[in-house]
Image (cartoon, rainbow, N blue to C red):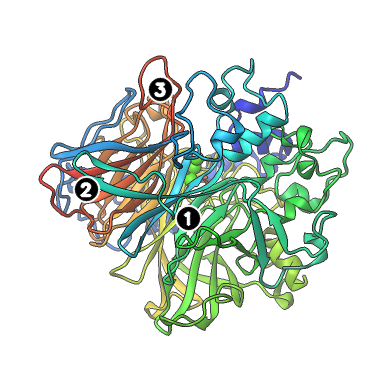
Amino acid sequence: MTRPDLTTLSFDEMDELRDPRPDVQGFDHVVERALSRRGFLNGALAFGSAAAVMGLGGLASTTSARAQAAGRFAFAPIPIATDGTVHVPAGYRWDVVAKWGQPLFPDAPDFDHETGGTAASSERAFGDNNDGMEMFSIDGHTLIAVNNEYTNPEYLHPKNPDGAPANAEDVRKTQNVQGVSVIEVAEGADGWSVVVGSPFTRRITNTTPMRLSGPAAGHDLLKTAADPSGTKVLGTLNNCGAGKTPWGTYLTCEENFNNFFGASNPDHGFTDTDKRYGLGAESGYGYEKFDPRFDITQNPNEPHRFGWVVEIDPANPASTPVKRTALGRFKHENAAVVLAPDGRVVVYMGDDERGEFLYKFVSTRPYAPGIDTGTLLDEGQLYVAKFNDDQSGEWLPLTPESTGMTMAEMLIFARVAASRVGATTMDRPEWVAVNPIKAEAYCALTNNKNRGVKPNAGGDATPVGGPNPRAKNLYGQVVRWAPVGDDHAATGFKWDLYVMAGNPTVHNDAYAGSANITEGNMFNSPDGMMFDSAGMLWIQTDGEDDNAGDFKGHGNNQMLVGDPVTGQIARFLTGPKGCEVTGITWAPDRRTVFVGIQHPGAPFPDGEGKLPRSSIIAISREDGAVFG
Ligand code: FEO
Ligand code: CA
Ligand code: CA
Ligand code: CA
């Protein structure tokens, strides 16, 4: 069999290639179950999870729900786009603030469109594929900490025939365009721009020294020849979504770290836990060929040192980032932080892979302004979600007793622990967003073509039902839950589906979507999500943008605003062809929202003949009014 070009595969495709899963559930059975759930759209919300879709009665009828969204939106929704640039509603404007390769330090060279830069220039410039980000106001300075999730080799190494790294310099360059950028931004007559030379500026890369802390730190599984202490790691990998603590630190989340490792021995004996985390012989980036740290044959424990949530103090560029093992190791999407009524810190976290789980951490000690927060995220209880078909749910504690694993093993192999307690396999949990004005949280379940078809990587069945109600789910949905007693630390919750994405112009069954999906707001693959201060939910998409077949009428990836009260959803932004819209944070005065345009396919934003560059854009109202 001809192997596909690894540099062009998505992370999911890579995982599937390495670990093809058996079809154990039977196609006929799947179809039967899917058909039995027809009737979503006609008010026949008769049973099971079908009844859970906007089951709170927010939509009076199918007819009114499919009417053009108006309601509480402060903008006129825009149509889809299929072109190479950004569109926002009338009365709003957008501008580029930062783009891949842009110099952050006075000594850094301008970006070179011929070469995509060098290893040295990349370390002094804005990173590639910006994703989750958070704004910090520090002594009158506005900082944005932003993830640089990964890189597209065909653009990063435009002179290499297949884009693959050809030597150690290429690998160092690849490592230096990723990680995290901390930038200061300021608003001038021409809008927002980066403050080059700000003392807060920092690049954190795949090789920046970091510390492991919490219950698993120092465990044998975290020790390597270079670090016999099991507490000192170089770098952070595949930083996807983010979070912000009440004490002013940034949480960056390591997602598809597995794709940066390979094995020089083609017969390397991968363990069950290696396989659960998607480790394989060949990486997508060639690190293992030029940097032995990423060769699993030589360093089998190095992958255990990634897949964590990392805490960074953006106010102190000399500080050492800390990997918090108490929050568990998996393919972390984001870290949505909220305080329980008693001050304990609750962190909601998705594990973005087909059939993996939704987690939360609850700190042992409460947070209060002024306390020492150095170990607040090191002590606490990790839970995993179980959703019941009757719209109740519970957070199952992961403990040595409940899992039969030691504390350290349980955290390092959190997926295995979660399987053992019977957590609900989910349709790829992406961002969690917490409503600031009501005790509820939302998680984007982006899509899952394996729902009802194949088990997850641990062999857990992925039955159709609960918050994952569609077999071969190609559109995705958003689940929300309200904790018992309005207490995010509580172990019980009630859930429903806020929206099921779909296409009512192509389908007239469950794949049309829930009643709040209309021809005017269609989208697929919800991913990034953030609430604004008014309690409106901003939803970003990372889906199929071919605008054909099942996706006809969806156009390019986009950003929408959802009203949690009425269920209405309105399209606010469309991105350039090929991009994903991901990452959102507001300026301190909330007159500007910063949004990420990741991996545009078109030559955005510099135009024809130039390399496409992932960018942060700033969007504001032409009348200068506060929004969001
Ligand atoms: Fe990096 Fe699951 O998105
Ligand atoms: Ca994402
Ligand atoms: Ca995604
Ligand atoms: Ca992405």
- Expressed as whole percent of the image width and height from the top left, the position of residue 420 reads 71, 65
Mark 1 or mark 3: which comes first in sequence?
1
Mark 3 or mark 2: which comes first in sequence?
2
Mark 1 surroundings within 10 Å by alpha-carbon count, few (fewer than 14), some (14 through 19), many (20 or more): many
Find residue 115 and report its image quarter: top right
Label 3, on which residue?
Answer: 602
Query: Does residue 504 lie above or below 577 as drawn?
Result: below
Q: Secondary structure at mark 1?
A: strand
Q: Which mark is residue 302?
A: none
Q: How many marks?
A: 3
Q: Residue at x 76, y 47 (%)?
A: 275
Kind of residue sitting beneath label 2: Ala
Kind of residue sitting beneath label 3: Ala
Quadrant in which the C terminus is drawn: bottom left
Report if residue 473 is visible in the image.
no
Residue 379 is left or right of residue 49, and the answer is: right
Label 2, on which residue?
Answer: 65
Q: Which mark is residue 242?
A: 1
Mark 2 or mark 1: which comes first in sequence?
2
Residue 369 is left or right of residue 386, and the answer is: left
Q: Secondary structure at mark 2?
A: helix
Find residue 103 and report its image quarter: top left
Mark 2 surroundings within 10 Å by alpha-carbon count, few (fewer than 14), some (14 through 19), many (20 or more): many
